[in-house]
Amino acid sequence: MSASDPPDDIDSEAWEAWATEVVDGTGFDVELGVGLARDAQRVARGEMTEAEYQDKYHEAVLDEFGVDDRPTAPEPQKADGSPLPGVPGTGNGKRSRRSMLKTAGAIGLGTLGLSAAQQSTRTVAAQSGDGDSEPDVQMGMAINTDRCIACLQCMDACNEENGNPAESLWMAVLRYQEDDYTDNEEFLTRPCQHCSDAPCETACPTNARYTREEDGIVLTDYDQCTGCRYCEVSCPYGVNYMEWAEPGGGDFEADRDVDGVTAAGSAPQGTMGKCTFCAHRQVSDDESLQGTTACEDVCPVDAIHFGDMNDEESAPRQHLANDTGGQPTYRLLEDKGTDPNIVYVGNEPSRTATQTDGPTGENEFDLVRERHGRREIEIGSHEDDD
Amino acid sequence: MSTTNNTILTPLKTLSVKFLALVVVLGIAALVMLEAIVHQLQHGLAVTDLASWGTQEGVTWGIYIGTFEWFAGMAVGALAAVGYIRYNELTRYDIIARIGELWALIAGLSAAYLIVIDLGRPDRVLNILTAWFVTVQYSPLAWDVTFVTALLVMTSTMLILSLRRDFSEMNLNKLPVYTALIGELLTLGFRPEEREKLDSMLRWLGLALLILAFTGGMVPGWLLGVVGAQAGWYGGIAGIAFLSAGLLSGVAVLAITAGVLRYLYGMEEALPEEVFVGLGKALTLFGFVYLVVQFNNLLPSIFPMAPLAESQVGEAMLYGHFATDFWLAMAAVAIPMLILVLFRERMLAGGVGLAVVSVVMLWGVWVKSQLTVIEPLMYSSGLPYEVGTYVPTLVEWVITIGAILVAILLFSIATKLVPMGRLLDDTASTEEVRN
Ligand code: SF4
Ligand code: SF4
């Protein structure tokens, strides 16, 4: 978000100056950038059609950037150049399942005449505005597991911050070993991946699981969730924690309210909790908290970098650009098609990796893996079973 | 052919001590279950052994959902049987259709009830309905709610219309007073000219039930089948696997009920041997199809070319952790099926034999339903988590078995309230000539 707000009149000099300053910071062709921005405003106001906009700049954008990768890049066209019917503009030329669904959602609502339905607002919000269903800001993380020393401070800080019970490990550091004749123990720092194509949302029968449009964070409306756990079974990462009993965790001090939805902090009994990217911080009045998470703050080796994945200047993007130390980068279980927003730096755990024994936080911190009242977990079950 | 089937009214007209004892026992079971439900409502799902998959190394769906799948399947199977009988106007199986209507309704209700029991916030079950207009476009759980609702509505309609016809053929004065009252209510404004229209409505409604069973009937299977995160669930055969289990268990529950009714009330004429032969044939076929589908679903996963996650699930089922349960379940379907093939005539003489093999088959399907739900969650794939554990608690057992016993209780009470079929003699006999 820019510090100064743009002047209203796009034809004024003040606007020109403001836009020039913003574009100048990117190091790209200023004239083109300002023109793009001005006409984008016109499109938003309905003074120009998207097609006109595309036509006008397609060549120039190609020249400048080598590709035309704008969120509203020209849609697939028929041979005669007319647009294909029924193909909604969904960003980056690739059509995500989520945006497909949302289009379907909006169309469905229209035909049913239910635009006022309470549930619809969040889903349809994606369709309004600039017509681009991917948020401009997409919060995410770059996590450098090569740096991780499994001190588990992120896990502890997360539970403290969110007032979670000891067994709800929204942030978990998994210890594992590859079957590669080395004794190397590796770590996987695993919060919710805040997927852009989140299967947990598709599964949810109450619409409680949703993506916050402002910043792409995946949240749970605690007032809406019925605790059916369909989100949990459909998430490939195992990051969801149902509150089976009255959560006996610490206190959550911040406001649970995120734009009028109860979605921050620990989940109440019978509902589903998971990492919120410290949503209460993102909506906090305290600017120093915005754009930060508790886990990132405490990490002693600076392995966690939180920020807007669409912004080149953000901490995660900067880390990925400059600090990977030659380590590979990857997204977890990318083949599941969830489009996760956490990029890892380090070795990806293989499908045959096995968990290794080691501190999971019981000693230093107040963390456990066992659900309260259930038997103790023994490591090594995979081998035992063979 | 003798058309005397007066015995059809015997369950209505008798009230034995044995029956009362059964109701009392089942009633006590219902109370115990109620106690367990109150306990669960007070303490939350913490009283179960469910836990999150992942670091908690549990399974998040357990025997409530497994039994839900079983009941939902039973409802679909009963629905299909009713549809088939009504559409083809198999008069001799009329009583089976009535039993099926009642079971489809009761099993559907039991399934819905178990879903609510499984919710962390059962008080919010209505949220599923208020969000339905949006979520039905993508959430398979919302489809499920839709399907179960459709099933309940269509079954009730079938039950009401067929009862209207059956009551209209009876002398209400000869029936117990409460049954007569129901009859009175259901035949309100009945005119004899309506008979023909009713007949054709039942027939077409039967076709609609059949279609529903073979299309929407797969939805509870898709609930698991579309979940890409869980190896062992995801795949194109999930709907078919569910349907094949449903057809088997649906027909099995009809066979059990018919056998028990015939035995208890001496309904030899109303339930002639041919009916049991027919049911036995259906069970043999559906048992065979069930086994073929199950193994088709599983065997590819243990081939060396199969993906790792799938093979873990398949191996645990076929010769790992769950092998005993799995093979017992398969034997519970296969052996009765073989018995039916080999000794059909002798076994079926009284219907009791068929009831016994049906119970065994039903148990087998139940066990496999549990494994289907639990196992992939336990053998999670993808990240380095441990294999989960799950041992249902007493509360879970009490509520689950309670749900089954309450279903039996409901059916038992229903036999005292509504006739089990139509009278083929006295007043209506002339109309049967055309058959
Ligand atoms: S990691 Fe799981 S819970 Fe988080 S957004 Fe993705 S699918 Fe949903
Ligand atoms: S547990 Fe809650 S958030 Fe998850 S799918 Fe069910 S209702 Fe939605």
Image (spheres, coloured by chain):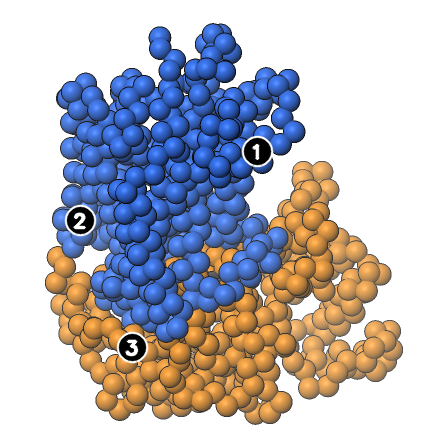
Q: Which chain is orange?
A: A
Q: Report the label total.
A: 3
Does residue B171 appear left or right of residue A48 in this picture? Answer: left
Question: Residue sitting at 71 percent across and 38 percent down?
Answer: A80
Q: Which chain is blue?
A: B
Question: Which is more N-terminal, label 2 or label 1?
Answer: 1
Q: Position of residue B428 (x, y in %)?
A: 49, 15
Query: Label 1 crowding class (10 Å Cα cut-off): few <14, some 14-19, many 20+?
Result: some
- Element type where label 3 sits in the image: loop
Which chain is indicated by disc 3?
Answer: A
Contact between marks 3 and 2 (CB within 8 A): the answer is no
Q: Is residue B278 above or below residue B300?
A: above
Residue tagged 2: B325
Question: Does residue A114 appear anywhere in the picture?
Answer: yes
Residues flagged by tags 3 and 2 on a common chain: no
- Element type where label 2 sits in the image: helix
Which chain is indicated by disc 1?
Answer: B
Q: Is residue A138 above or below residue B309?
A: below
Q: Is mark 3 within 8 Å of ligand 2?
A: no
Which chain is indicated by disc 2?
Answer: B
- Element type where label 1 sits in the image: helix
Q: The residue under label 2 is which amino acid type?
A: Asp
Contact between marks 1 and 2 (CB within 8 A): the answer is no
Q: The residue under label 1 is which amino acid type?
A: Glu
Q: Position of residue B375 (x, y in %)?
A: 26, 54
Question: Residue sitting at 72 percent across and 60 percent down?
Answer: A116
Q: Position of residue B76 (x, y in %)?
A: 41, 37
Q: Mark 3 to mark 1: distance in Å?
A: 56 Å
- Front-most of residues A371 and B47: B47
Residue tagged 1: B184
Residue tagged 3: A372
